[in-house]
Image: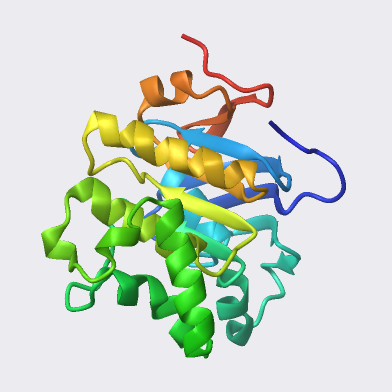
Amino acid sequence: MQTAAGAPIIEFKGVSKTYTTGTHALKDINIKIYKGDFVFVVGASGAGKSTFIKLMIHEEAPNTGEIIVNGFRMSEIRRSQVPLLRRTMGIVFQDFRLIPTMNVFDNVAFTLRVVGASSREIRKKVTAALSVVGLGNKSRMFPAELSGGEQQRVGLARAIVNNPSMIIADEPTGNVDPNMSYEIVELLTEINRRGTTVVMVTHEHQLVRDFNRRVIMLENGTIVADNADGGLES
């Protein structure tokens, strides 16, 4: 399940984050995640899961400690480098964040067009990504014509289309039915088997129990469990 060899691709060293409201979101977090890992990050609302994601993608900065992601040291990263950091990762959101006026193909192609990919490359990569998530026959449909589960699969295709080294999935099953929740995690598992690191934030403990992976549990901003052997205690 894990390949803890070489330097970690995600590392938090003594990281704490307190917002201006006085909320202590994370306290002295120390985590190492390696290439090829599949990690669930779990915890109740307010445990610090969202802050963990925001720090990883440099949407927020820590008050203390150091974060290194894909070789980018967050304390030294320049604003111009943040897009480069984010191109190394695919991000899947709970609320899909699809562009309603674009069809499935163009939603997935959007990130490739932003970085100036050729039409031929876009066609090849988008077709391959849609095939992985089982939506090859729905490329011309619009988000409103799709179910919630299908919309999330479009979001997943968009996340993998540029072959990122990691997928950051923030509550990706939060707006889909239970059966589709399992399908989404199975798709993430298949992507992980191909070598992509997956970090999935979720509150669905039953889902985590059914997929035997590493589990990091947050509670009140601290790590209360990190089962590197996979699984979640009942």
The quarter of the picture where the N terminus appears is top right
Query: What residue do we see at 55% from left, 79% from top?
Result: 83
**Where is 199 relative to 118, above or below?**
above
Regarding residue 1, the answer to whether it shows in the image is yes
Q: Nearer the viewer, residue 203 or 147?
A: 147
Residue furthest to the right:
6
Q: Is residue 147 left or right of residue 215?
A: left
Regarding residue 48, the answer to whether it shows in the image is no
Q: Position of residue 222 (x, y in %)?
A: 55, 34
Residue 93: which quarter of the image? bottom left
Q: Position of residue 145 (x, y in %)?
A: 12, 61
Q: How many marks?
A: 0
Q: Is residue 202 left or right of residue 116?
A: left
Q: Nearer the viewer, residue 71 or 75?
A: 71
**Where is 19 relative to 13, above or below?**
below
Q: Position of residue 43 (x, y in %)?
A: 42, 31
